Image (tube, helix red, strand yellow):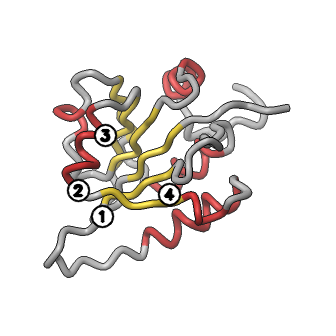
Amino acid sequence: MLKGIPQILSPELLKTLCEMGHSDTLVIADGNFPAESMGKNAKVIRCDGHGVPELLEAILKVFPLDGYVDKAVNLMEVMPGDSVETPIWDIYKKIVADYDDRGESTVGNIERFAFYEEAKKAYLIIATSEKALYANVLLQKGVVVE
């Protein structure tokens, strides 16, 4: 065991986060996301039994967001005509604001199929048991500045 590391971050997940370099991306995927088919060229780590917010918070404790892009965090847009509510996005924005000085202004939206294309290029996809719809989030890694 280590001090100061959120217990939800497994050794495999910590190792993979550490391997990622500047501008690499990861997706924290909800339970409906096709993680395995989208992640054919990525590492896919399963975090069954966990939701996206708790993983997002734990990851942002150790993972710097890219400061060279306007939107280092992106959410999957709701499809036109779909009446799904997305209150989980407010939770994400609060979490991001707790860990990035830009606050929720660094959170953007990507059209659903464009999000899938970005996910196919991700270094890592984390599959969760999140039940909320449109609860996928894409993070772009930055650099640690001390």
Give the Cα separation between the discs numbered 4 and 2. 20 Å
Q: At label 3, which amino acid type do we have?
A: Glu
Q: Nearer the viewer, mark 4 or mark 1?
A: 1
Asked if marks 1 and 2 touch (Cβ < 8 Å), the reply is yes
Residue indicated by mark 4 = 53
Circle nearer the N terminus (1, 2): 1
Q: Residues within 10 Å of mark 3 (few under 14, many from 20)?
A: some
Give the Cα separation between the discs numbered 1 and 2. 6 Å
- What's the residue at 62%, 35% (across, down)? 142
What secondary structure is found at the residue carrying circle 4?
Answer: helix
Residue indicated by mark 1 = 77
Q: Position of residue 134 (x, y in %)?
A: 29, 63
- What's the residue at 63%, 37% (across, down)? 63
**The quadrant where residue 5 appears:** top right
Query: Is residue 62 toward the left or the right of residue 47 in the image?
Result: right
Q: At label 1, which amino acid type do we have?
A: Glu
- What's the residue at 48%, 29% (across, down)? 24
Give the Cα separation between the discs numbered 4 and 3. 21 Å
Residue indicated by mark 2 = 112
What secondary structure is found at the residue carrying circle 2?
Answer: helix
Residue indicated by mark 3 = 118
As displayed, is residue 20 above or below residue 69? Answer: above
Q: Nearer the viewer, mark 4 or mark 2?
A: 2
Q: Residues within 10 Å of mark 2 (few under 14, many from 20)?
A: some
**The quadrant where residue 3 appears:** top right
Q: Position of residue 25 (x, y in %)?
A: 45, 35
